[in-house]
Image: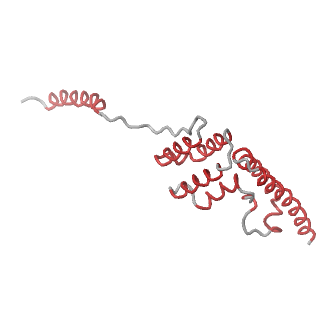
Amino acid sequence: MKSTRAYRIPLLLGLLAAAAVLPGCNTAPARELSCVPPQGTNLDAAFAQTRQDLAAGCATHFDGYLTRLLAIAQGDPQPENKRRFSDFLVWANEQSLLSRRQAQAVYNRYFNVKFVALSGDYNTCSQICPTRERVMRDMEQELRDKERGLLQISRDRESYYRADRLYHEAELVLQATCTACAER
């Protein structure tokens, strides 16, 4: 009677050989998702690739894709770029990549005169005045984003200059309001 050890060694060697060969039997290589935002200058192709990549599993890279789309659009500024970004953000909401409120905030940040940084139902004296400097810094950054979206991407000078006026008016109103609140 042979020992069980004598059977185990050839069996073990056979299993090791099979394990080394089996990975080569996979005839359909897995597609590796690279999640690289679009390159080039064609905005329509960039939106198409972005939608495809985000739907295929690159949703965590949404901000990088958006940044790249904005850069590509700057290379070909047109008034209809506002609509293109609006359509894209609606699609992103429908795909559950962004909530409706998030999609609106992104659109408004770049393509609307309305300031996202100063939205909401806040009590100016108790909530805005203590953080007025931060709010104004946020609005200043948002104005730069509006310059990019409204001027550099959409060529909408009128809307950008309206946003610029609103920024300066908000600054004056906040200063006067916060001074009045402090005197109470």
Residue 112 in the image: above or below residue 149: below
User: Is 56 positioned to the left or the right of 2 in the image?
Assistant: right
User: Is 48 positioned to the left or the right of 4 in the image?
Assistant: right
User: Is 132 positioned to the left or the right of 63 in the image?
Assistant: right
The quadrant of the picture occupied by the N terminus is top left
- Residue name at image x 64 percent, y 59 percent: 104
Would you identify the image quadrant in which residue 159 lies? bottom right
Residue 118 in the image: above or below residue 13: below
- Residue name at image x 91 percent, y 72 percent: 184
For this orientation, the residue located farthest to the bottom is 184
Residue 155 in the image: above or below residue 28: below
- Residue 8, image x and y in percent? 18, 31
Would you identify the image quadrant in which residue 12 lies? top left
- Residue 136, image x and y in percent? 81, 55
Q: Nearer the viewer, residue 184 or 78?
A: 78
- Residue 103, image x and y in percent? 61, 57
Q: Nearer the viewer, residue 27 or 70?
A: 70
